[in-house]
Image (cartoon, rainbow, N blue to C red):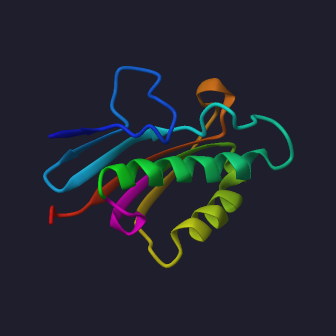
Amino acid sequence: MNFIFSDKVPAPGGHYSQAVQAGGFTFVSGMLPGPGVAVDGPENFARQVRATLQHCERVLEEAGCKLTDVVQCTAYIVDVNNWPEFNRLYAEHFGTHKPARAVVPVPELHHGFLVELQMVAYRLAP
Protein backbone atom coordinates (compact mmCIF):
# COMPACT_ATOMS: atom_id res chain seq x y z
CA MET A 1 0.00 0.00 0.00
CA ASN A 2 1.29 3.46 -0.93
CA PHE A 3 -0.01 6.70 0.60
CA ILE A 4 -0.05 9.64 -1.82
CA PHE A 5 0.39 13.30 -0.89
CA SER A 6 0.88 16.17 -3.33
CA ASP A 7 2.05 19.62 -2.31
CA LYS A 8 0.27 20.98 -5.42
CA VAL A 9 -3.17 20.70 -3.78
CA PRO A 10 -4.57 21.76 -0.41
CA ALA A 11 -3.42 19.55 2.47
CA PRO A 12 -6.01 17.16 3.95
CA GLY A 13 -8.14 18.74 6.65
CA GLY A 14 -8.40 15.51 8.61
CA HIS A 15 -6.80 12.15 9.29
CA TYR A 16 -6.64 10.76 5.74
CA SER A 17 -4.40 10.58 2.68
CA GLN A 18 -5.08 12.48 -0.53
CA ALA A 19 -4.94 9.08 -2.24
CA VAL A 20 -3.96 5.49 -1.51
CA GLN A 21 -2.59 2.98 -4.01
CA ALA A 22 -3.19 -0.75 -3.64
CA GLY A 23 -3.18 -3.58 -6.17
CA GLY A 24 -2.96 -1.36 -9.25
CA PHE A 25 -5.75 0.93 -8.02
CA THR A 26 -5.41 4.53 -6.87
CA PHE A 27 -8.22 5.72 -4.61
CA VAL A 28 -8.46 9.53 -4.55
CA SER A 29 -10.11 10.87 -1.40
CA GLY A 30 -12.96 13.33 -1.64
CA MET A 31 -11.52 16.58 -2.98
CA LEU A 32 -13.03 20.01 -2.41
CA PRO A 33 -12.15 23.20 -4.34
CA GLY A 34 -9.96 24.33 -1.44
CA PRO A 35 -8.90 27.68 0.01
CA GLY A 36 -8.81 30.62 -2.33
CA VAL A 37 -11.78 29.48 -4.42
CA ALA A 38 -14.75 31.82 -4.04
CA VAL A 39 -17.88 30.36 -2.53
CA ASP A 40 -20.18 33.00 -4.00
CA GLY A 41 -20.69 34.85 -7.27
CA PRO A 42 -22.20 34.07 -10.69
CA GLU A 43 -19.34 31.83 -11.89
CA ASN A 44 -18.92 30.19 -8.51
CA PHE A 45 -20.04 26.65 -9.38
CA ALA A 46 -17.94 26.49 -12.55
CA ARG A 47 -14.83 27.79 -10.72
CA GLN A 48 -15.31 25.20 -7.99
CA VAL A 49 -15.77 22.30 -10.40
CA ARG A 50 -12.68 23.27 -12.43
CA ALA A 51 -10.55 23.68 -9.29
CA THR A 52 -11.69 20.34 -7.89
CA LEU A 53 -11.01 18.50 -11.16
CA GLN A 54 -7.53 20.05 -11.24
CA HIS A 55 -6.85 18.93 -7.66
CA CYS A 56 -7.87 15.37 -8.55
CA GLU A 57 -5.68 15.43 -11.64
CA ARG A 58 -2.65 16.66 -9.64
CA VAL A 59 -3.07 13.93 -7.03
CA LEU A 60 -3.41 11.34 -9.80
CA GLU A 61 -0.19 12.67 -11.38
CA GLU A 62 1.60 12.35 -8.03
CA ALA A 63 0.45 8.71 -8.03
CA GLY A 64 1.77 8.15 -11.58
CA CYS A 65 -1.70 8.14 -13.12
CA LYS A 66 -3.56 10.18 -15.73
CA LEU A 67 -7.21 11.09 -16.17
CA THR A 68 -7.44 8.28 -18.73
CA ASP A 69 -6.66 5.83 -15.90
CA VAL A 70 -9.78 6.86 -13.96
CA VAL A 71 -12.30 4.02 -13.89
CA GLN A 72 -14.87 5.54 -11.52
CA CYS A 73 -15.85 8.96 -10.18
CA THR A 74 -18.37 9.96 -7.54
CA ALA A 75 -19.45 13.60 -7.58
CA TYR A 76 -21.31 15.24 -4.72
CA ILE A 77 -22.99 18.45 -5.84
CA VAL A 78 -25.13 20.91 -3.94
CA ASP A 79 -28.45 21.51 -5.75
CA VAL A 80 -29.54 19.03 -8.42
CA ASN A 81 -30.07 22.02 -10.72
CA ASN A 82 -26.26 22.23 -11.01
CA TRP A 83 -26.17 18.78 -12.65
CA PRO A 84 -26.24 19.97 -16.30
CA GLU A 85 -23.42 22.47 -15.70
CA PHE A 86 -21.41 19.85 -13.79
CA ASN A 87 -21.88 17.37 -16.63
CA ARG A 88 -20.72 19.94 -19.20
CA LEU A 89 -17.58 20.88 -17.24
CA TYR A 90 -16.79 17.25 -16.44
CA ALA A 91 -17.11 16.24 -20.11
CA GLU A 92 -14.94 19.22 -21.11
CA HIS A 93 -12.23 18.09 -18.67
CA PHE A 94 -12.33 14.34 -19.45
CA GLY A 95 -12.82 14.63 -23.21
CA THR A 96 -13.56 11.28 -24.85
CA HIS A 97 -12.67 9.26 -21.72
CA LYS A 98 -15.87 8.20 -19.93
CA PRO A 99 -15.29 6.47 -16.57
CA ALA A 100 -18.18 5.03 -14.60
CA ARG A 101 -19.76 7.83 -12.56
CA ALA A 102 -22.36 8.70 -9.97
CA VAL A 103 -23.60 12.23 -9.33
CA VAL A 104 -25.11 12.59 -5.87
CA PRO A 105 -27.10 15.73 -5.06
CA VAL A 106 -26.56 16.78 -1.43
CA PRO A 107 -28.00 19.60 0.68
CA GLU A 108 -24.58 21.01 1.66
CA LEU A 109 -20.85 20.33 1.75
CA HIS A 110 -18.06 21.31 4.14
CA HIS A 111 -17.03 25.01 4.16
CA GLY A 112 -20.01 25.96 1.97
CA PHE A 113 -18.49 24.41 -1.17
CA LEU A 114 -20.77 23.20 -3.97
CA VAL A 115 -18.82 20.18 -5.27
CA GLU A 116 -16.70 17.32 -3.96
CA LEU A 117 -15.12 14.64 -6.14
CA GLN A 118 -13.82 11.17 -5.33
CA MET A 119 -12.07 9.02 -7.98
CA VAL A 120 -10.66 5.56 -8.52
CA ALA A 121 -7.96 4.97 -11.12
CA TYR A 122 -6.41 1.72 -12.29
CA ARG A 123 -2.91 1.35 -13.64
CA LEU A 124 -0.55 -1.58 -13.49
CA ALA A 125 2.96 -0.70 -12.36
CA PRO A 126 5.44 -0.45 -15.28
What residue is at 42 percent from the left and 64 percent from the top?
67
Q: Is residue 74 left or right of residue 34?
A: left
In this view, the residue farthest toward the bottom is: 96
* Residue 121 drawn above or below residue 116: below
Quadrant occupied by the N terminus: top left
Q: Position of residue 99 (x, y in %)?
A: 40, 66
- Look at 52% across and 33% down and name the residue there: 10
Q: Residue 115 in the image: x percent, y percent?
A: 60, 43
Say above or below: 15 vs 29.
above
Residue 103: x and y, percent? Answer: 53, 52
Residue at image coords 38%, 69%? 68
Q: Which residues are magenta?
A: 65-73
Q: Report the front residue among 64 and 18.
A: 64
Quarter of the rendering occupied by the C terminus: bottom left
Indicate whether residue 105 is drawn in magenta: no
Find the residue positioned furthest to the right: 42
Q: Is residue 77 left or right of residue 56?
A: right
